[in-house]
Image (cartoon, helix red, strand yellow):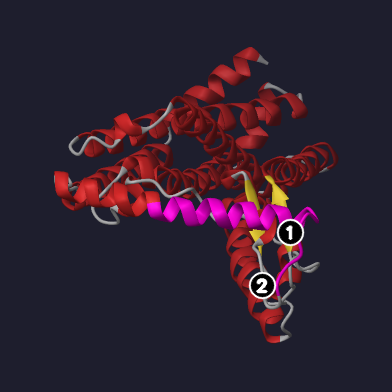
Amino acid sequence: MSRLFAAEWSRLFSRRVTLVTLVLIGGLLAVLTFGFTLTRSTPTPDEIESAKVNAASAAEVWDSNVDRCGKVQSGLENAEPNEHFPRGCDYGSRPTPESMLQYGFSFHRQWPSLFYTAAIVLAVAGFVLGASFVGVEWSSGGMANLLLWAPRRGAVLGAKLLAACAGVGLISLVYLTLWTAAFMAVAAGNGTVSQMTGGEFGSLVLTGVRVVLLAVAGTALGFAIASLGRHTSTALGVGMAYLLIYELGALILFGVIQTVDYSQHYRLSSYISAWLTKGFTFDTDAACSGCVPAAGFSGSWQQGGLVIAAVVALLVMAAFVSMHRRDAR
């Protein structure tokens, strides 16, 4: 198994599609970094002082709203007519002086959206790399030749899957590290990095771990679908069909019948959002005085991770079963 893994690991990083993918995502990082460099600006002392005053005022309102919402939803107070509250008393982040400076680039304020962007890039790259890594083996006849040398079907497919996932995991880790360092360097010009607390840096690291794991899941998903269809184009076709027909199509369909929130239960993107953002909430249009509407959907990052893992595990198991039951031609 170790020899198979070493061979597949070497093959993964010698493939042209891997090198092209690395160049593309590296180029994207360079373009985005340059773009954010152009928007970087250092606030003046007067602007900082004004932001502090505005943040203090906004924070008082935020604290009052959260306190009032908590008391009403816990039953300590009654809601006034036409008084409504967000689900979970989620009023967003507490206002800070930096959040009042809504211009230029701020790593402190914008790093979550940067990481979510990286997650999309790496998950798509992983899906393509995983699909092409095994798909080209089936379509070219390389899998049949390999099985003549190593007839253990499960071990062969497992080594390929492990190499693909480990390779994409390493690529994602290195890329995300460079991604973070590049944007921190951009932000260093206006001193926003130093304003992050230890807890915020811890949240950044944990989000980075979730991004890497999502990329690995995307790799396994593409690998499994391509193995089942025995062609790279099968995985790419299934992926595009799912996004265009199911994700977008279901959104339009349920929007027409005015139950958009219902579709969120059955869309993988909802659970991916929950996984990345540590929670997902879809608010309905239904009004509810002093309470949360019964309709709608909300989930934690744990629920999102379990659903993603279940989908990936189901397809990977199907790929291994198919490998054992079908011929290798």
Majority SS type along the magenta span: helix
Q: Is residue 18 left or right of residue 160?
A: left
In this rendered view, identify the residue nearer to me: 35 or 22: 35
Residue drawn at the location 37% of the way across and 51% of the way down: 55
Asked whether the viewer can see residue 268, the reply is no
Displayed quadrant of residue 278: top right
**Where is residue 54, by image quadrant?**
bottom left
Disc number for residue 72: 1
Quadrant position of the N terminus in the picture: top right
Q: Which mark is residue 170?
A: none
Residue 283 visible in the displayed image: yes
**In magenta segment, residue 205:** no
Q: Label 2 is placed on what type of residue?
A: Glu
Q: Residue furthest top?
A: 2
The picture places residue 288, in percent across and down from the top left corner, at: 74, 73
Q: What span is in magenta?
A: 57-80
Say which residue appears at 74% left-offset and 78% top-offset. Answer: 259
Up-down: is 300 above or below 237? above
Q: Are marks 1 and 2 in contact (CB under 8 Å)?
A: yes
The amino acid type, in three-letter code, at marker 1 is Val
Q: Observer-nearest residue: 283 or 314?
A: 283
Q: Report which residue position mark 2 lands on.
A: 83
State the image coordinates of residue 164 (x, y, percent, origin top left).
Answer: 56, 32
Residue placed most toward the observer, 211 or 109: 109
Measure the C-alpha gap from mark 1 to mark 2: 10 Å
